[in-house]
Amino acid sequence: MLRIERGSYLTMPWKNGAGITTQIAAYPADATTESFEWRISMAAVTADGPFSAFPDVERTLAILKGAGINLVIAGLKQHLTRASAPFTFPADAAAHATLIDGDILDLNVMTRRNCFSHSLRKFSRATTIPVSGTVNIVFAQSAGLLIDDGNQSNWLLLGDTAIFGDAPKSLSISTEGSGDYYLIELTRLR
């Protein structure tokens, strides 16, 4: 288990220069926005506008803070709020966001096609979760978490992330009070 504290995330401009993103983790470690095989990040959206385009990439988006956004992706409309399930779409399709009522913070999971596939699931209670990804990642959105992968356990504080590369069969997660956390499963395709 690799624990990444929120204070060590990398902040950088969006690929299109229209905002700021906070990269939580990417693979390979020295990857750029053009060369990653997978990437996990958060973005503060403070104005209506286009999303950055990422050729040959699938993207899943979840709203962490704020009222939400209305997306138009290749002409199709999607309404996203904190209560919405994570939404997956092609990152190379033209996408435009309109804020519903003020700024938002979103969680982005991106995988390069033919390298990895991914899933993003939200949880709000203590549970044991079966996992099957090549790499499994837990992001503690709004509470401290105790995570046990069968070999070791560790605390995640609010905003921290844990990465499991040895593909445990399940993760037991206990929450410090009520709060949301996300499980990201990344599966290598080649």
Image (cartoon, rainbow, N blue to C red):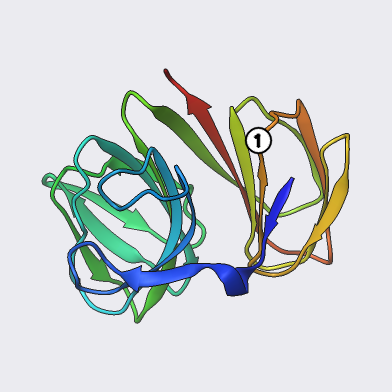
Q: Is residue 178 left or right of residue 165?
A: right
> Which residue type carries mark 1?
Gly
Q: Position of residue 44 (x, y in %)?
A: 38, 73
Q: Position of residue 148 (x, y in %)?
A: 85, 43
Rendered residue at 73%/67% (across/down): 143
What is the secondary structure assignment of the residue under circle 1? loop
Q: Position of residue 61 (x, y in %)?
A: 40, 52
Closer to the camera, 58 or 99? 58
Other residues around mark 1 within 10 Å, as few (<14) / some (14–19) / many (≥20): some
| Residue where numbered disc 1 is placed | 165
| Picture mark count | 1
Rendered residue at 76%/25% (across/down): 169
Instruction: Answer above or below: position of 102 versus 90.
Output: below
Give residue 69's quadrant in the image: bottom left
Closer to the camera, 41 or 90? 41
Q: Quadrant of the N terminus?
A: top right
Q: Position of residue 74 (x, y in %)?
A: 12, 44
Instruction: Answer above or below: position of 168 versus 143.
Output: above
Closer to the camera, 37 or 140? 37
Residue projecting furthest to the front: 30
Rendered residue at 36%/79% (across/down): 103
Q: Quadrant of the C terminus?
A: top left
Q: Is residue 5 left or right of residue 58?
A: right
Give residue 7's quadrant in the image: bottom right
